[in-house]
Image: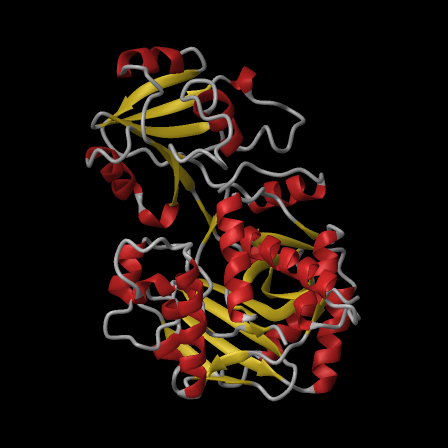
């Protein structure tokens, strides 16, 4: 089975992309999503976050939410807002923010390659989030959120994409956050074959962002395979929507932590416990860590710089050396009593795009007791963990800029 293949994408009709394009479903709160759809009846959030069309307080995992997603998808199809390409294609997708430009390939990636670890994971998923994506895919018979994949830079693929992105794009929009999104359609059979061959020759791909979406796609494929007595392997459910970028064009931000309480400790005792492993220095300004094993902490209205004792940094453990692991293994687990951050609702994860003031605000408002800022995980560390067959702690990387939802979706026939 090929690593990737072209597919007949579901896209906004000509001129409708500005109405449809939306941020990824999982980067905003329910309240933020409701504000974003105000006056935008064709925003893709009506499909990816359909609770915006139901009463406030509706359980986002309730059956009526997924039914509403299907209803909204069918409405946008019947109104001609979304249309399907007539034949399988690849697509070139470019994101531009300031001086950062990233160009990748939109393709259907193989579930079999994912199961065989040719598409390598680096994080475990949170069960409730994975279950949500399974129900969403089943309800829509479509994958609407692309999985962000990475390949080790390959000149052949990069050169092909560079040529394909010279003509005017089919879609060219600028999102509210200033990011420019461009999309080119690749329907020439010879070019499709060149891209397929070039990708088949690479060793493998890495899941950069979208572990829940890829894991959910694999579960849906397994269930549909078991239910299909005529299964051949060519069915669309054997592939998942992806955008594939070269590793050296990634922009990774910090992925920070907030915790609701100090696990029964008062602030003085908590600080004393920290000093057993860290040098703790008060800081008059918010702390954005500048190097490995350095952390910022916001507690009771004040910032602190935490520097871990080097004796506590594992030397030959690609997972244990990660900053997210160092914080987990020296603070979050043993002091704050959260051994499994995947399943504990006392901990929250905050992408670096929110900023340090937003992080501190969670504590000042009383929603959280303490916040931690982290140094971003380098791309090379991510690939080293994946190559070793290991996994990172959850929410270890925050990639920017984010892919838009709604520009291309993958229907399951």
Give the residue displayed 61% in from the left and 44% down from the top. Answer: 122
Tell me residue 24's x, y (percent).
42, 61
Q: Is residue 81 visible?
A: yes
217 left or right, relative to 178: right
Q: How many marks?
A: 0
Foreground pick, 344 / 356: 344
Front residue of 60 and 385:
60
Residue sitting at x 54%, y 43%? 378
Query: Which coloring applies here?
Result: secondary structure
Quick one: quadrant of the C terminus?
A: bottom right
Does 63 sit left or right of 287 as displayed? Answer: right
Q: Is the residue 390 above or below the residue 410 in the image?
A: above
Q: Quadrant of residue 48?
A: bottom left
Occupied quadrant, residue 265? top left
Relative height, residue 64 to residue 386 (above, below):
below
- Residue positioned 71% across, 74% down in the render: 195
Q: Residue at x 58, y 76 (%)?
A: 91
Question: Is 310 situated left or right of 68 in this image?
Answer: right
Looking at the rendered image, the quarter that the N terminus falls into is bottom right
Image vertical order of residue 311 relative to residue 339, above or below: above
Residue 223 pos. (x, y %):
67, 59
The location of residue 149, given as percent across then percent down, is 60, 58
Depicted 264 relative to depicted 327: above or below = above
Res 99 seen here: no
Image coordinates of residue 153 in percent, x first then y, are 66, 58
């Amino acid at each position: 089975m090929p690593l990737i293949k072209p597919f007949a994408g579901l896209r906004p009709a000509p001129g409708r992309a500005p109405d449809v394009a939306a941020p990824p479903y999982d980067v905003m709160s329910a309240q933020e999503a409701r504000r974003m759809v105000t006056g935008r009846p064709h925003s893709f959030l009506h499909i990816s976050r359909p609770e915006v069309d139901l009463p406030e307080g509706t359980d986002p995992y309730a059956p009526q939410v997924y039914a509403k997603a299907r209803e909204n998808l069918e409405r946008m199809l019947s109104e001609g807002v979304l249309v399907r390409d007539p034949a399988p294609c690849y697509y070139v997708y470019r994101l531009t923010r300031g001086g950062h430009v990233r160009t990748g390939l939109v393709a259907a990636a193989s579930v079999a390659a994912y199961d065989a670890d040719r598409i390598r994971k680096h994080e475990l998923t949170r069960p409730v989030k994975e279950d949500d994506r399974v129900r969403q895919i089943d309800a829509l018979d479509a994958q609407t959120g692309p999985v962000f994949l990475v390949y080790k830079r390959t000149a052949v693929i990069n050169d092909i994409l560079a040529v394909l992105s010279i003509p005017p794009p089919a879609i060219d929009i600028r999102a509210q956050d200033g990011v420019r999104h461009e999309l080119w359609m690749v329907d020439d059979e010879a070019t499709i074959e060149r891209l397929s061959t070039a990708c088949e020759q690479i060793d493998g791909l890495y899941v950069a962002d979208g572990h829940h979406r890829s894991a959910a796609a694999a579960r849906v494929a397994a269930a549909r395979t078991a239910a299909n007595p005529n299964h051949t392997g060519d069915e669309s459910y054997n592939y998942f929507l992806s955008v594939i970028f070269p590793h050296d064009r990634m922009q990774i931000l910090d992925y920070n932590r907030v915790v609701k309480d100090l696990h029964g400790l008062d602030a003085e005792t908590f600080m004393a416990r920290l000093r057993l492993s860290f040098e703790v220095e008060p800081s008059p300004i918010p702390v954005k860590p500048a190097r490995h094993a350095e952390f910022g902490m916001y507690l009771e209205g004040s910032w602190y710089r935490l520097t871990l004792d080097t004796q506590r940094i594992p030397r030959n453990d690609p997972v244990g050396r990660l900053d997210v692991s160092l914080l987990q293994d020296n603070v979050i687990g043993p002091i704050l009593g959260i051994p499994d951050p995947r399943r504990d609702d006392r901990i929250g994860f905050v992408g670096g795009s929110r900023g340090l003031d937003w992080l501190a605000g969670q504590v000042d408002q009383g929603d959280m007791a303490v916040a931690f800022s982290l140094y971003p995980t380098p791309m090379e560390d991510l690939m080293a963990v994946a190559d070793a067959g290991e996994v990172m702690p959850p929410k270890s990387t925050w990639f920017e800029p984010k892919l838009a939802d709604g520009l291309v979706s993958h229907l399951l026939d």
